[in-house]
Image: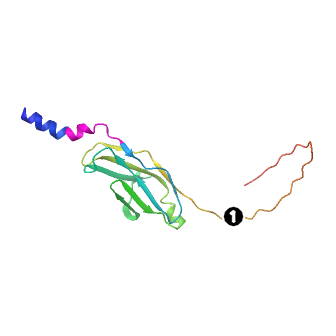
Amino acid sequence: MLFLLIFMLALQPLLAFNELMFTESPQYSVALPGDSVYFSCKTNLPSAIENITWLHDGKPLKAANSRASKGLLTFRVSKKSDEYRDQVGTYQCIGGAQGSPYKIASLKAELSIAFLGEFAPAKPKSIEAFEVSIFKIIVSI
């Protein structure tokens, strides 16, 4: 009987969280080159046993240019287009209890980089229209 009581007490934290779910998930984000980006993720587990890891485009996130701590992922978007192209894509968190083989994955959040490209000067064009005329305007962008 004592063994059963000890066993039930050991399982109690797991039984209390049998419906593991996210209470905070990463959201779609648009950033400018040079901006800081923040993604956050949290489960309904107590923070003492919660373990959050991050994926970028479905692969474990390389920690070289980012910082992840207690469900918060932060990094600065590169100002160089050939570098920030590697930062765009989907970000996803994986959550669960430390040491547990059971994990859940959040929905994917997309990171897009906003930028202004070169504007080509437009040549002015004039169009003549007469009353009761039907005409078609073709615009190419």
Identify residue type, mark 1: Phe
Task: Work out which residue is located at the far top of the displayed protein and give it.
Answer: 1
Q: Residue furthest right?
A: 131
Q: Quadrant of residue 107?
A: top left
Quadrant where the image shows the N terminus: top left
Q: Residue at x 33, y 47 (%)?
A: 95
Q: Residue at the location (72% across, 64% down)?
A: 120
Residue in the picture at 37% in, 55% down: 72
In this picture, residue 133 sits left or right of residue 90: right
Q: Is residue 79 left or right of residue 22?
A: right
Instruction: Return the x and y of residue 136 as percentages of the image width and height.
Output: 83, 46
* Residue 33 part of the magenta segment: no
Residue nearer the viewer, 123 or 37: 37
Q: Which residue is mark 1?
A: 119
Badge 1 density bin: few <14, some 14–19, many ≥20, Cα 10 Å:
few
What kind of colouring is applied to the model shown? rainbow
Q: Is residue 58 above or below residue 65?
A: above
Percent coordinates x, y for residue 123 in the rendering: 80, 62
Residue stretch rendered in magenta on the structure:
12-21
Q: Does 130 appear above or below 120?
A: above
Coordinates of residue 98 in the picture (x, y in percent): 25, 49
| Image location of residue 121, percent across then percent down | 74, 65
- Left or right: residue 135 versus residue 38 is right
Quadrant in the picture for residue 10:
top left
Quadrant, the C terminus: bottom right
**Which residue is rendered at x = 90% and y = 49% of the image?**
129
Relative to 39, is 7 on the left or the right?
Answer: left
Label 1: element kind: loop
Of all residues, the one furthest to the bottom in this rendering is: 80
Answer above or below: position of 84 versus 133. below
